[in-house]
Amino acid sequence: MELEQLRADMVAAMKARDKERKDAISALVSAVKKAGIDAGCREDIPADLVDKVILKELKSAKEQLDSCPVERAELRAEYQTRHDIIAEYAPSMMSAEEVEKYLKENFAEALGTKNKGQIMKAVMGSLKGKAEGKVINEVVAKLCE
């Protein structure tokens, strides 16, 4: 995902007078800009940094939704809408089957050790942002049996 695409979508939401969508995308743009400044690349922010920030914001929105009391229906609906909008921009994650195939192709020797900690250490660097840590952990545990 590119920052320019987020900005264009934010402008489109403003023109359509879609306040919830504009607010969610605006928060994403702000978070991406802040991450870019922190990383020292204020002018051209790489797409992988944008994706990383989107995933972080998606996780934050999911935590908000999970911690919201059931009695607060209007607040839950607002959080759900924000989560759904951010999810549209999140990069697609690998499924458990894809992770297993990737591990067998690229980390065969590490899998041979059956040492879960060592395998996770080797794998997480290359799969970070491509698959959820929970999915990777489950696949590695299954392969170590």
Image: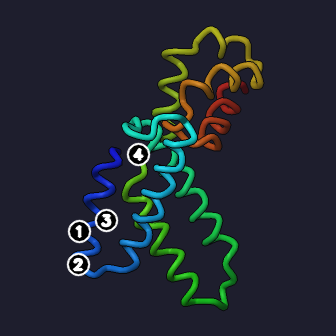
Q: Quadrant of residue 22?
A: bottom left
Q: Quadrant of residue 13?
A: bottom left
Amino acid of disc 2: Ala
Comparing labels 3 and 4, the label whose residue is closer to the camera = 3
Residue position for label 4:
92
Q: Mark 1 or mark 4, which is nearer the start of the sequence?
A: 1
Amino acid of disc 4: Ser
Cα separation between marks 1 and 3? 5 Å
What colouring style does the render use? rainbow
For the residue pair 14 and 138, the one nearer the viewer reads as 14
Q: Quadrant of residue 42?
A: top left
Left or right, 125 with reference to 69? left
Task: Look at the numbered discs 1 and 3 and tell me whether their residues touch, using CB distance below 8 Å.
Answer: yes
Residue at the image point whose x is 49% and y is 36% from the top:
130
For the residue pair 78 and 132, the one nearer the viewer reads as 78
Spot occupied by residue 87 in the image (x, y as percentages of width and height): 43, 59
* Quadrant of image for the C terminus: top right
Residue position for label 1:
12
Most extreme residue toward the top is: 109
Cα separation between marks 3 and 4? 21 Å
Spot occupied by residue 64 in the image (x, y as percentages of width and height): 63, 70
Residue position for label 3:
10
Residue position for label 2:
16
Amino acid of disc 3: Met
Q: Mark 4 or mark 3, which is nearer the start of the sequence?
A: 3
Cα separation between marks 2 and 4? 27 Å
Task: Look at the numbered discs 2 and 1 and tell me whether their residues touch, using CB distance below 8 Å.
Answer: yes
Cα separation between marks 4 and 1? 23 Å
Amino acid of disc 1: Ala
Residue at the image point whose x is 43% and y is 72% from the top:
23
Q: Mark 3 or mark 2, which is nearer the start of the sequence?
A: 3
